[in-house]
Amino acid sequence: MRLELRGITKTFGSVAANSAIDLTVEPGEIHCLLGENGAGKSTLMNILYGLLTPDSGQIVVDGEAREFKSPRDAIAAGIGMVHQHFMLVPVFTVTENLVLGNEEARGGLAGWLDRRKARQDVVDVSERYGLPVDPDALVEDLPVGVQQRVEIVKALMRDAEVLILDEPTAVLTPQETEELFTVMRGLKAAGKSVVFITHKLNEVRAVADRITVIRRGKVVGSAEPTATARELASLMVGRDVRLVVEKGPARPGEVALRVRGLSVVDDRGQVAVDDVSFDLYAGEVLGIAGVQGNGQTELVEAITGLRPATGTAELFGRPLVGTSPRKVLRQGVGHVPEDRQHDGLVPDFSIAENLALDLHDEPPFGGLWKLDLDAIAQNGAERLAEFDIRAESALTPAGALSGGNQQKVVVARALQRDPNLLIAAQPTRGVDVGAMEFIHKRIIEQRDAGKPVLIVSTELDEITALADRIAVMYRGKIVGIVPADTSNEELGLLMAGGGVEDEQAPVEATDAVQAAEESSETTDE
Amino acid sequence: MSSRLKRILVGISTANTVTVTVLAFVIAVVIGGILMILSDQKLLHEWGYVFQVPGDAFKDSWHKVSGGYTAMFKGAIYDPDNPQAFRPIENTIVNATPLAFAGLAVAVPFRSGLFNIGGQSQIIIGAVCATWVGFTISAPMPLHILLVIIAGIIGGAAVGGLIGLLKARFGAHEVISSIMLNNIALGVLAWLISTKTFHDPNRHDAISKPVKDSALLPHIHGSSPEMNLSTVLAILAVAAVWWLLSRSSLGFRLRALGSNPEAANTAGISVSRNQVYAMLIAGGLMGLVAVTQISGTLSASHAMTNTLDNGIGFTGITVALLGRAKPVGVALAALLFGALNAGGRVMEATTQPTVPHDVVTVLQAIIVVFVAAPMLVQEIFRLRDVRRDGSAAVTSVAPATVVDSATEAL
């Protein structure tokens, strides 16, 4: 199926989200839609999927102009969409989810559901396109990557010829991303087209046949997958972007954060962090690498006082573990939580109020009783300018911002207090290239000012770009602390467990501490 | 048309909070009128032959409905036939006063992410404390009533604080523990009234000793003898809660945990401690309701009965909802409900045949239903969506997907 968008325009109030966008998706191609957060990619795809009506412009399917009033029309025309946030019922099985909304087609006269046939359909589709899913598994028990696969199967079961994937890799581990790419290539081989929305340059180059770049609601160009990341970034941001973080060698000072024998239990009662010890020096960036869910989240929560733990973590000799988040923050810790929506922002609060959230009862923002609204507003306006937060004003509710701008607010809050320890988990998640460059620069500035910085990221590129030393976490343990110039293959091996058996782990942990001391010595020289 | 006028018209025809509330009121008045017609046998009979003689049914129905609402207006706002023409509006204010306290007592926890359905128990225990201080202690007039007020606040706050503590320490959901405490408080009240300490020996029914005259809320200026100090306290409470929520650091914490408790916690704001504070404040405000019920001039006996709470704890929920949990909104909603109550009573007494006071209850319910369902009002009157650009009032009327993409576009 050949899909064309002609002159699509959509304005919200005075803002043109899409202006005169032309886009052609040929059958059997992976077409990449590349653009920053808020560039208008999602608006365009919501128009294509019938969720929004364009102000003007046409959608042409196989040479015939079509009008989509609802997703139903789009699905009937052979368009399938996998949203960033999955539209699945967690307590239903895979099969039940897949027939949901389609069940009347399978029911008998009395609306009886033919489970066996439904199950067989699921198995057929998943085998035909090489998308292994267990039809009887409950969706809530499945990892995110598999849930996404269920979404793709759902679209295929409704005979989608064009599949829209909205930022599909944002929630995936590197391995899951690779698997997704394999699936996409398989779909292409089966003659389907894939529209792949992203702002990650490496992914585009890995998988796309054609690339269309959107900036501020307009198509600013197309590119071949052979284009360099830098060329793509410049096209996307509209100026020259440096993808490599420029930084000199670290000048580590005294031990700032000393963690010894830290163990943490997660919400399900499982040991998430298992006897972890490491030192973080003033003036260095320690990156914690690892596949999502290997205890990084709980480690940060323990150090920031959000989760009870055993063992110790001391900042310049003063204990952090076993206090409260408030006391940890009062010691001057700046914390960028990994999930900005869940733990970072108060959506109903303005940007200015969010920036004052952790300091609202300290001068200049307020005291024991009173807030200083003027100081809060003034600080909001200043940070808005400093961090290039794109919003009408600092009084805009944080919930109304795009993801990247929300992240800038959270990062600005942690940095504005001039922290004597910066802990940033996924500091650039969902942030476009331009903002990423800026945030990375600010993190390195902290380091160069002699501050200790702890970075947790599942993006290996980010870790290697920022960190002076890299600690790799696997199943709650630090399986190694290695210098920053360690190859990705070696890191990947460590992240996957690297043949470390559980019995050997205590030895590894002591090795890790030794490695830390050794590497600090080497950087001292 | 001047651009300014146009802007005002666009503003009105947009589904903002004020427009939706006003239109909800209009719908309620229309439905209330229909109910008045339906409650009258003679009119129903006339509507039976409406196609033969349409004049009767329409004319009499009009008289019925306009008569009912006129009586209500005269009872609630202004009565030209009364020598004290402003007496009705004073009645409205007197009726609105306890509702304002109760509405605030629901609004503060609501903004903090808690639902205070325990007004009944807070009022009852507040009343027990206030009454006890009122009939045991002997003190000169200004001191005595001050002690009564403080006792009422402490009693209410103790129950509110207990609910908060149960949630903070043991994770007991506040709605469940509140409902249980309501029942416990009712039982405790019934028992206390029967004890020697509380029961009035001169009476055979279930009533406590009355408080002393020095424990009554003093009358303030106005033609109505029922206007008393509690109205001044209510105005102060509205101002205090406004200051608390918009200017104080405690209010900042409360609003933060009402909107996203996880983010508040991550930013070092203790969720459990501040939840207790919210419930303490709420209980204290409910305690002031208790003081108006015991020491107020609306109360004939100035003593505790088994029905002393009068359902005000629950009405407070609707007042807070109608006032969108904002202090000034709560004050206006309390005035509206106070007017409907005052007017309803006069309507029932003066119309012939009687229009029952129940119409007022239905009116209140319909207003709240439509305010709670802004989408419905928007659909009925074909209002435009509010643009989500930070400057316009943000309502939840726009479908989420549209909002999301608009946000993405910005």
Image: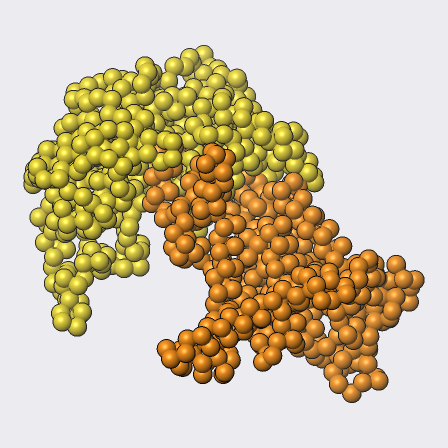
Chain colours: A yellow, B orange
Does residue B401 show up? yes
Image quadrant containing the C terminus of chain B: top left
Give left or right: position of B236 versus B182.
right
Which residue occupies 69% across, 69% down? B124
Does residue A264 show up? no
- Rendering quarter of residue A382: top right
Measured as percent of width and height from the top left, residue B90 is found at 73, 61
Give left or right: position of B175 versus B217.
left
Which residue occupies 34% across, 24% down? A433
- Rendering quarter of residue A43: top left
Measured as percent of width and height from the top left, residue A481 is found at 39, 28
Measured as percent of width and height from the top left, residue B118 is found at 61, 65
Measured as percent of width and height from the top left, residue A525 is found at 45, 12
Q: Is residue A451 above or below residue A65?
A: above
Which residue occupies 58% across, 71% down? B68
Give left or right: position of A499 versus B351.
left
Q: Is residue B263 above or below residue A317?
A: below
Q: Is residue A267 above or below residue B202?
A: above
Which residue occupies 14% across, 62% down? A105
Q: Nearer the viewer, residue B284 or A509?
A: B284
Image quadrant containing the N terminus of chain B: top left
Q: Nearer the viewer, residue B299 or B44?
A: B44
Q: Nearer the viewer, residue B177 or B360?
A: B360
Q: Is residue A214 above or below residue A178?
A: above
